Amino acid sequence: MSIKDENGVNMWLFAEKIASIRDKVRFDMRISTHDVARLCNVQGYTALTNTPLVLPLPPTQPAVIDFEYTTRGSERKESIPVSRLVRREAHTGCPHVAIRGEHMGLIVDISSLAGENTRVVRFGESKRKKSNILVIRSADLAPVQVHSSP
């Protein structure tokens, strides 16, 4: 039996370290393509789940995720293929999760953005203590909403 490409578009959502925190965080994303044209580019969040899919996914298992968004004043939730979602870029003002590298799954706050590297601290730690600062590539961060303490 073969498995799905673990390096495919947004498959990091199913990585064990990411899946283990999906009951605490919702990833800030937008729909890039949808069968209903007016839903393209709609912002939303991955749904919280206590039972996330985890890699490796068997070939019979679609790589979908429950996605919540608001359109025309009503809240909606639907299962969307992860390949149709785009995560927002790293920015200040909200927590982020490291989605690749040695800090994968770590929830962080941004201290400063500087080109391709970002100075961060663990979520809830002081940005003023130099010993708390970590450097993570900006491309390896995804903005989130945190719904309970990590």
Image (cartoon, rainbow, N blue to C red):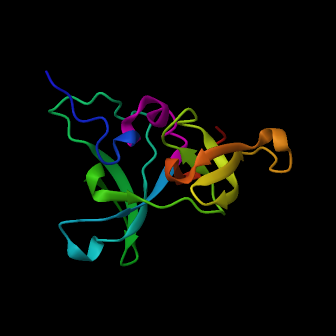
From the image, which quarter does the C terminus lie in? Answer: top right
* x then y, percent, for residue 39: 29, 71
* x then y, percent, for residue 146: 60, 49
* x then y, percent, for residue 120: 69, 48
Left or right, residue 70 beside residue 143: left
Q: Residue at 60%, 45% (x, y): give it.
A: 136
Left or right, residue 100 beside residue 150: left
Residue 81 visible in rendering:
no
Residue 136 forms part of the magenta stretch: no
Query: Which one is in front, 53 or 110?
Result: 110
Residue 14 forms part of the magenta stretch: yes
Query: Which one is in front, 105 or 36?
Result: 105
Q: Quadrant of residue 85?
A: bottom left
Magenta residues (range): 13-25
Q: Residue at 46%, 45% (x, y): give it.
A: 48
* x then y, percent, for residue 55: 33, 29
Q: How many marks?
A: 0
Q: Residue at 30%, 50% (x, y): give it.
A: 82
**Location of residue 8 with respect to 55 vertically, above or below:** below
Q: Quadrant of residue 12?
A: top left
Q: Residue furthest right?
A: 129
Q: Residue furthest front?
A: 115
Left or right, residue 37 beside residue 131: left
Q: Quadrant of residue 149?
A: top right
From the image, which quarter does the N terminus lie in? Answer: top left
Query: Which one is in front, 84 or 128?
Result: 128
**Location of residue 79 with respect to 14 vertically, above or below:** below
Residue 118 visible in rendering:
yes
